[in-house]
Image: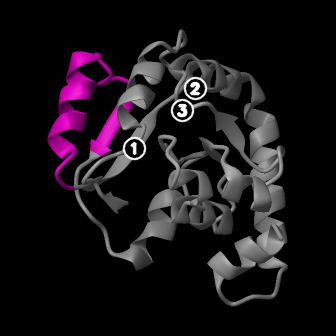
Amino acid sequence: FTKLRALPGGGPAMHALARVRDRGALHLTLIGEGDFSDELHRLIAELDLHDMVSFDNRMYPLHDMPARLAPFDLGFVPMERSSVIDYALPLKLLEYTSLGLPSIGVRNIAVQHYFSEDDCLYYEPSDPDSLTALLERYVALRPVIEQRGARLRVLVVDDGSTDGTTAAANRFR
């Protein structure tokens, strides 16, 4: 649910998804619009991912997003490494966490500060095979991931904060 000027790590992520052996076990839904939309459509067609990727090429009001994200099992926060990104705490990761949605993301200095090894599933952005392996392990780990989501949801809600993002950040101090 973003303006897709670029989807950092999106190209390698699409290539990683294309290498998943059990194509019926995973489905990626992308929500957003922008300058990168044409590139995403091209990648989906070029890599023959129509059976694994849905691209909802539009924006939704922010207040609609919790209901739109509710049916999903996992949030995906692709990033590429850079000197700036190494210190960035992705807002998408905080949003997914505040909704109790477990996430796949890139470990960096800021993420490591707030999130433990058990709070996210990590991949190396320079190695698409690491994402492919993680996605394949996700199928086997799905019951564990669902338990983590329930645990995070309880911890965030029980924080007492009225701001979900603040609650998520407080949880990981």
Q: Give the secondary structure at mark 3.
A: loop
Q: Are marks 1 and 2 in contact (CB under 8 Å)?
A: no
From the viewer's perspective, tell me whether residue 11 is left or right of residue 104: left
Which mark is in front, 3 or 2? 3
Query: Distance of mark 1 from mark 2, alpha carbons?
Result: 14 Å
Q: Disc 2 designates what residue?
A: 131
Vertical comparison of 93 with 63: above or below: above
Q: Quick check: is 33 in the magenta stretch?
A: no
Q: Quadrant of the C terminus?
A: bottom right
Q: Are marks 3 and 1 in contact (CB under 8 Å)?
A: no
Vertical comparison of 1 with 164: above or below: above
Q: Give the secondary structure at mark 2.
A: helix
Return the disc, 3 or 2, that comes first in the chain's sequence. 3
Query: Distance of mark 3 from mark 2, alpha carbons?
Result: 8 Å
Name the residue rendered at 55%, 60% in the picture.
Answer: 90
Q: Position of residue 130 (x, y in %)?
A: 61, 21
Q: Give the secondary structure at mark 1.
A: loop
**How are the colours assigned in the image?**
one colour
Mark 1: amino acid: Pro
Q: Position of residue 6 (x, y in %)?
A: 29, 48
Q: Disc 1 designates what residue?
A: 8
The magenta-colored residue range is 34-55
Q: Position of residue 170 (x, y in %)?
A: 79, 77
Which mark is in front, 1 or 2? 1
Residue 125 shows which numbered tag?
Answer: 3
Q: Position of residue 61 (x, y in %)?
A: 33, 75
Q: Quadrant of the N terminus?
A: bottom left
From the viewer's perspective, tell me whether residue 80 is left or right of residue 103: left
Q: Quadrant of residue 8?
A: top left
Q: Residues within 10 Å of mark 3 (few under 14, many from 20)?
A: many
Return the disc, 3 or 1, that comes first in the chain's sequence. 1
